[in-house]
Amino acid sequence: MVINPHKLGVHKVLQHIPLNKVFDAPAKARLAKAVNIADLRLCAKQRAHKMVFDYLDAGADDEISLRRGKDAYSELEMHYHILAGLKPPIDMRTKIFGCDVKLPFFACPTAGNRMFHWEGETAAAKAAEHHGSLYGLSSLATTGITEIGEICKQPKVFQLYVWKDRELVKEVLAKAKEGGFNALALTVDFTWYGNRERDIRNDFSIPPKYTIKQMIEAIKKPAWTYNFLSHEPYTYACINTDVPADSLAAFVNSQIAPEFDWRDAEWLLGEWGGPAAVKGVVRPDDAIRAVETGFSTMWVSNHGARQLETSPATIDVLPSIREAVGPDVEIIMDGGVQRGTDICKALALGADSVGVGKPYLYGLAAGGTEGVIKALEILRVELDRAMGLLGVANVDDLKKRGPGLIKRRHTSVRDYPDRYAYERGYGGGII
């Protein structure tokens, strides 16, 4: 058995020594000054352990898809109408999975949130409650379904991987139903674990290994370290709270079913019996088959550019997915979103709603609940401004008139980051 501070019970002592506020004071001051998502990224980088930040920030292989996913929005111009007769605030209300929400974007389900901040998934749930947005919980969450249900009364979607163990799947689905989750999202682009080389270089593990290298990095980030050491160790709370959160890659490799196919998807839909999205669609033919299989929602995603390198930018394939499934099938899109204008472009080109991952996780790593609320607020204000200047009164108006408002242009070097862009957070994978 490997001895570490949690097994020695150090957290039970430290939780009675209220130093978190002291260590977090500089991070809190930086968070207050953040103007945009790029600022939040830098706040997260300054507070979080290097291994943790790079896990959040990274993409697969050479991170080409990660950069393209952001750059793709730069190729889209917004051809606005004038004298539209609008006044703020813009009406952003819409429906996602048939449920009323106040925002057409939401925090995507993401794994292991407590590695970024002890509040973990509860921070995003509280932010969803604050903003009136959809909340998404990952089946690899470090907070349980029941706890999330008590915190967030907003519409909720539960994300599921293609597990081998059908009894485990049935058990988790039953918990999600009991917890008040309205919809299911099946992630289908995670049948192999992506090659994330920053994680390999950092010797990333959950929980951290207590090597000299990791301890040196921990000393550099006292706020994150005290936060981690003074709270209970995290587990995969949606699956088995008695099992520690071992290496994410090892766990996934042992449980993921690469052989999962369309027939298995039909079985899953039958077990769930409610609104369901297939998450990871980038091809029109797959979207058509998913509709025929019984999925109510297409979730256009490439897993944050963390799986197959050189997979397409989701904003680029979105119009073809909309054309394939027609106007009546719900489409969610995520990937590369850093600005409210990015959300605006996605809604205009065929998405009914937009998921964001890295932006709110930067906020979480930077400052817990306060950071997630700020991340969503930054995007809300930017989207309100973009829609107003574009000349659209509400989300439905944007979706109806969108194709005529967004035009693709030939790119130039002026569209992309200068040599100091990495410090400002643009193009996250640049090393």
Image (cartoon, grey):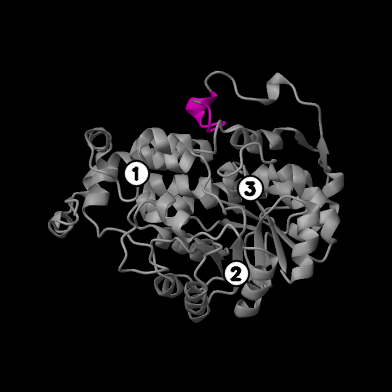
Image quadrant holding the N terminus, namely: bottom left
Dot 1: within a 10 Å radius of its alpha carbon, few (fewer than 14), some, or many (20 or more) residues? some
Q: Amino acid at mark 3?
A: Asn
* Residue drawn 57% across the image and 53% down it: 190
Q: Position of residue 147 (x, y in %)?
A: 39, 72
Quadrant position of residue 14: bottom left
**Number of numbered discs:** 3
- Number of the front mark, 2 or 1: 2
Q: Amino acid at mark 1?
A: Lys
Instruction: State which tag comes first along the sequence, 2 or 1.
Output: 1
Find out whether residue 426 is within the magenta segment.
yes
Find out whether residue 372 is within the magenta segment.
no
- Residue receiving disc 3: 302
- Residue receiving disc 1: 28
Which residues are drawn in magenta?
421-430
Q: Is residue 340 above or below residue 178?
A: above
Q: Is residue 141 above or below residue 180?
A: above
Gap in angstroms between the C-alphas marked 2 and 1:
35 Å
Q: Amino acid at mark 2?
A: Leu
